[in-house]
Image: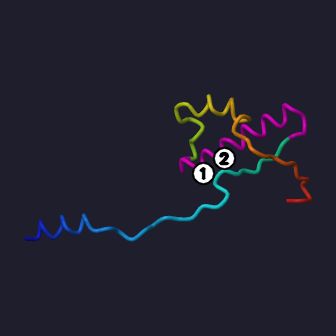
Amino acid sequence: MPVLLIIMMCMSPLPGLAVTVTNLYEAEVPVADQTANGRSAGIQAAFIQVMVKLTGSRNAATIYGVSELQQRAVQFVQQYEYRGVEDA
């Protein structure tokens, strides 16, 4: 009888432990300048920040395939903006 109770308890739904994450696909990174190279480096750094949020792993950059995606990160950007330090 105790075995049946344990099995039934395992099958019952557990209370939700989900957390709402805002700005999941957004990141803010400092850039050296507003040149194409500076923008590209910033986009790649922001991509890794987003991947950390999506995977929950601080080592997201080492996940298989992520470095290849990071090289193409500019293709995934829908919008970006520059803000001065005083705007932050």
Picture layout, residue 29 above or below residue 9: above
Estimate the spatial distance between the alpha carbons at disc 2 and disc 1, rounded to whole Å.
6 Å
Magenta segment boundaries in residue numbering: 32-57
Q: Report the side of 3 relative to 36 (left or right).
A: left
Residue under label 1: 53
Q: Position of residue 81 (x, y in %)?
A: 84, 48
Seen from the viewer's position, the closer of residues 57 and 55 is 55
> What label sits on residue 10 in the rendered view?
none
Categorize mark 1 by other alpha carbons within 10 Å: few (<14), some (14-19), many (20+).
some
Picture layout, residue 73 above or below residue 7: above
Hey, which residue is sitting farthest left in the picture? 1
Picture layout, residue 14 above or below residue 64: below
Residue under label 2: 49
The kind of secondary structure element at disc 1 is helix
The kind of secondary structure element at disc 2 is helix
Kind of residue sitting beneath label 2: Gln
Task: Determine whether label 2 and label 1 are within 8 Å by CB.
Answer: yes
Q: Quadrant of the C terminus?
A: bottom right
